[in-house]
Structure formats: C-alpha cells, structure tokens
C-alpha cells in the first residue's frame, strides 16, 4: 500500500505544486498518519521539502517537491518530455495563491465525503486546465488564452455534472486583467462547450468587496461585447464567506443579483458510470497489521 501511496503523493504534488498533509489525506483518501509517514520518508530521500505557511496559525507547513522529486513526479505522470528542472529549483513563489486554490478543491472534496455517490470526478491543475484551451496563432505558435487556476467536474448522482473553472483572486491583479480574463472565457468557452450555459467560472476573492465588482464587469461585457450570446455562467464569492458557510451553504453572486448554491447551478448531463473512483473516496486496503 505504501508504495502506491508514495507514487500518488508524488504525482499529486507534481500536479498541484503545494499541498498540506491534510489536503493530501483528503484528496487521496489516506489517513493523516499515513501521509505523515510518507512525507517523512520522501523528505529523507530528498524528494520533498517543507514550505512554511506564515499566513496560517500554529506554524503550519505545506509540502512541495524538490527538483529531484519533481523529476520523479513528472516521470510518474508521463511528463518526461516537457519537464524542466529549473522551474522547481527555487520552490513556489505564490505560496498563498497555491494554498488558497488547492484549499478550495479540497474543501469541496471534504464536503462530498458524507454524500453517497456524490463527489469530484476530476480536478485539473492550472497547466492541464490551460492545455484544454490551447489555440494556434497566425504565426503558428500555440497560445492558451484561458488559464484557470484549476478545473473541476463534480458529480451529483441522478442529476448531472457541475463543470467549473476556478479563479482564486488575491487582489493583486488589476481590474483590467480581470476584464481580460472574463473576455477570454466569454469568447473561447462557447466554441469548446456545446452546452456552455451549464459551464461555470467561479471567482473566489480575498477582498470582500471584489465579487460585486467582478460581476459588474461581466454584466457590462454580456450586454455590450457579447450582446447576450451563448455564454458560460460567472459567479463570485469572498473567501471569508466560503470559509464560514462551506460548499453547502455559500450563496454565490451572479449576474442580475442572483444568489445561488453550488448544487443549484446549471449542470451538464450525466454520462456513463465513471471509470475512475471519485476523489476522496478511492477504495483503500487496510495496512498490514504489525506483530506485537
């Protein structure tokens, strides 16, 4: 079991850059003690390192891969041809951004655990999510105009699938940059998703007043630039409200002053039974008993 768990931990850290022991335990469906034991072993081998999280209380730390560990993670993930060690040598810079993004996804996974047959079908990291929207320029070079901080597909049994792009906004980006992001979502997603009205763009903001501003910008684009064409649904919420009310109780702000919960957002239709287990609900064998 531990061999597979170590591989899964390396792949998870390779894809999502920075995760705490709790976030790894929730996402991979291992006990926290198992994750702590694995992290100690991987640190001894020089594959991962601790990253202090000073914005959290009680001296919390996260884990990230060393350049050596990232090479191993890339190999396990099938990314040997695109791996660049230099990107991992100094460690992650936007620590709070990585933590907040991954905390949102693990909060949603944690919420699903108590709901039978409901949960996260897919969680894409920023690079994998952006690769879905790569476009060719006239020069022949590839570009990804839509670069979400993550993409998720959440299953509501017998109802449908919630497809969402996450934008975790710390407030450092200008409103012009936010407008540019919304423009690209409104331009590109309708060309990719046949039922784009049931595809969500979710903004989680550190600044409490920012959700209304983001929706105001979206409404201007809807009425002017897009002229109410087929568009994705854009919603925004402050991180403070998300932490207080969670996945079940948070009311997201949308255009026209709408307030809606995640479970009530437009859904894509159901597909055949998923081949892979839901995240946080992977079947696990019990570790072997130790002799006394």
Image (cartoon, helix red, strand yellow):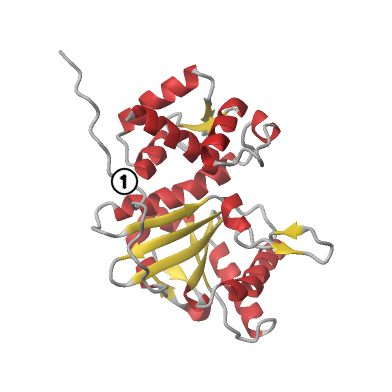
As drawn, is 52 to the left or to the right of 275? Answer: right
Vertical relation: 92 (above or below) 274: above
Q: Quadrant of residue 139?
A: bottom right
Looking at the picture, how far across and down is residue 249, in whole percent?
Answer: 33, 63
Specify whether residue 17 is in view. Answer: no
Vertical relation: 177 (above or below) 286: below
Pointer 1 local density, CA inside 10 Å: few below 14, some 14–19, many at least 20: few
**View extreme (left): residue:** 292
Looking at the picture, how far across and down is residue 131, in whole percent?
Answer: 62, 56
Identify which residue, 211 or 145, lies in the foreground: 145
**View extreme (top): residue:** 292
| Residue sitting at x 70%, y 32% | 86
Looking at the image, how many numbered discs can be counted on the residues? 1
Looking at the picture, how far across and down is residue 213, in whole percent?
Answer: 60, 68
Q: Quadrant of residue 40?
A: top left
As drawn, is 39 to the left or to the right of 149? Answer: left
Specify whether residue 100 is in view. Answer: yes
Q: Quadrant of residue 269?
A: bottom left
As drawn, is 133 to the left or to the right of 236? Answer: right
Tell me the quarter of the image containing the C terminus: top left
| Residue sitting at x 65%, y 79% | 220
Callout 1 secondary element: loop
> Mark 1 — residue?
282
Looking at the picture, how far across and down is residue 203, in whole percent?
Answer: 53, 62
As drawn, is 178 to the left or to the right of 198? Answer: right
Identify which residue, 155 or 214, lies in the foreground: 155
Identify which residue, 187 or 288, lies in the foreground: 288
Tell me the quarter of the image containing the N terminus: top left
| Residue sitting at x 38%, y 56% | 120
Vertical relation: 139 (above or below) 13: below
């Amino acid at each position: 079991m531990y061999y597979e768990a170590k591989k899964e931990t390396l792949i998870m850290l390779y894809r999502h850059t920075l995760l705490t022991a709790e976030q790894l335990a929730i996402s991979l469906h291992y006990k926290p003690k198992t994750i702590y034991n694995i992290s100690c072993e991987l640190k001894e081998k020089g594959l991962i390192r601790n990253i202090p999280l000073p914005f959290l209380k009680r001296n919390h730390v996260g884990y990230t891969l060393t350049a050596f560990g990232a090479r191993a993670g890339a190999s396990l993930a099938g990314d040997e041809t695109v791996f660049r060690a230099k990107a991992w040598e100094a460690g992650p810079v936007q620590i709070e951004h990585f933590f907040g993004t991954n905390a949102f996804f693990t909060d949603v996974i944690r919420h699903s655990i108590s709901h039978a047959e409901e949960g996260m079908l897919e969680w894409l990291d920023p690079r994998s999510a952006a690769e879905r929207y790569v476009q060719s320029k006239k020069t022949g070079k590839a570009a990804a105009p839509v670069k979400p901080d993550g993409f998720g597909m959440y299953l509501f049994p017998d109802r449908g699938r919630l497809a969402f792009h996450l934008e975790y906004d710390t407030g450092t980006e200008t409103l012009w940059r936010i407008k540019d992001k919304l423009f690209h979502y409104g331009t590109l997603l309708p060309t990719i998703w046949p039922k784009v009205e049931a595809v969500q763009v979710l903004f989680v903001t550190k600044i409490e007043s920012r959700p209304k501003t983001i929706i105001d910008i979206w409404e201007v684009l809807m009425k002017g630039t897009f002229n109410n064409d087929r568009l994705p649904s854009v919603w925004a919420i402050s991180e403070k409200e998300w932490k207080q009310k969670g996945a079940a109780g948070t009311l997201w702000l949308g255009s026209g002053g709408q307030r809606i919960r995640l479970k009530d957002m437009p859904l894509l239709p159901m597909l055949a039974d998923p081949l892979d287990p839901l995240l946080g609900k992977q079947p696990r064998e019990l570790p072997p008993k130790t002799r006394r």
